[in-house]
Amino acid sequence: MTTTLPDLFGTTLPLVQAPMAGVQGASLALAVAQAGGLGSLPAATLTPEALRRDLLAIRERTLGPINVNFFCHAPPDPDAEREAAWRAVLAPYYAELGLDPDAVVAGPARAPFNHELAEVLAELPTAVVSFHFGLPSPELLERVRATGAKVLSSATTVEEARWLDARGVDAIIAQGLEAGGHRGHFLSDDLQAQAGTFALLPQIVRAVRAPVIAAGGIADAAGVAAARALGAAGVQVGTAYLLCPEATTSAVHRQALTADAGGTTELTNLFTGRPARGIRNRLMRELGALRGDVPAFPLAAGAVSPLRGKAEAQGSGDFSPLWAGQNTTGCRAVAAAEITRELARGW
């Protein structure tokens, strides 16, 4: 393996800041880019107008490469019976917080990549476009490639990595089971088939032609060095940035990261309908972190959202998705540029 991320993207450092919808915006991506890494802007929750605004704000302050990340899930058909059952499960919490469950308007909070978003990329092209949950349709993918962007996507198994490699992605993110946030699986939802980063990484490196980026549990220079030794072309890091001033991490999320509970994470589908790793909280303890009766992704988020809003206003993260990876030791309330440079010393 001779290709590194600076070779591929034109960055100074072989480091990608993981896109983290809900806890960051343009400021964090910009700070990492200015420090020499590949800053990432999560666009799964952005309208085309908001995406255009953020890209313009970034472009005004850096000419360095930027990654824009999109989800490419298939939107589910609404299921009234399943939604009603889910609201019934949550009803005791609504009563406790004085909320009316009948007033909830459930709906998806995350949209997949589409032609409207592709139009923004054509207008404001970026160096890199990454996807979670596989790849979009061939037509949409061709529109992205026509902008000149490098294409990345996440793999949680060797099978997924081979699938991505066969479709010509420019690099593959090997997402280990330790990683925070949503699992990127798309060929199978069997969590038992997914491995930790340093078991998964060398298998994918041997199986594909594309450069491989290690993600999950990497929080310091030693972790970066270990990934390099196992053949990674670079690393992707998210959790270590959660306490940075440039992140928009909520007060209750920051508090959880600095408490003893910050080291206890679990995969859960309660907040969105899809497995994601976060700090264990009351809802996960009392309902069970993974359930079969939760509405499909991303519809589960609608009914949980009012509980989250009311509890957070009272200083509680009992009903909040406190996304974080298993290794929170790198989280520090310092500038993102400092975190980026410290991580890069391991290369």
Image (spheres, rainbow, N blue to C red):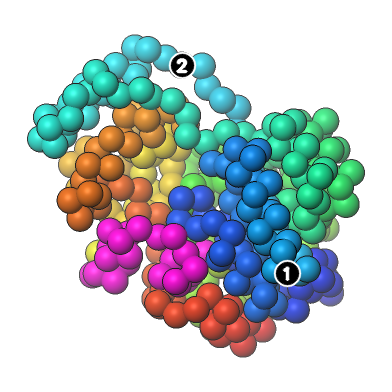
| Secondary element at tag 1 | loop
| Secondary element at tag 2 | loop
Q: Residue at x 40, y 64 (%)?
A: 326
Earlier sequence position, callout 1 versus callout 2: 1
In the image shown, does 165 or 305 lie closer to the viewer?
A: 305
| Residue bounds of the magenta highlight | 238-260
Q: CA distance from mark 1 to mark 2?
A: 42 Å
Q: Report crowding for label 1: few under 14, some 14 to 19, many 20 or more residues within 10 A (C-alpha).
A: few
- Quadrant (top left, top right, bottom left, bottom right) of the N terminus: bottom right
Which of label 1 and label 2 is nearer to you? 1
Q: Is residue 249 magenta?
A: yes
In the image shown, does 230 or 252 lie closer to the viewer?
A: 252
**Drawn side of residue 274 relative to residue 198, left or right:** left
Q: Amino acid at mark 2?
A: Pro
Q: Amino acid at mark 1?
A: Thr
Q: List the residue tagged with mark 1.
A: 62
Q: Quadrant of residue 226?
A: bottom right
In the image shown, does 301 or 236 lie closer to the viewer?
A: 301
- Quadrant (top left, top right, bottom left, bottom right) of the C terminus: bottom right
**Drawn side of residue 309 relative to residue 330, left or right:** left
Q: Is residue 203 magenta?
A: no
Q: Residue at x 57, y 46 (%)?
A: 184
Residue 190 visible to an observer of this rendering: yes
Q: Residue 287 — which label?
A: none
Residue 208, position as x, y percentages in the image: 78, 56
- Number of marks in the image? 2
Residue ranking furthest to the top: 81
Q: List the residue tagged with mark 2.
A: 78
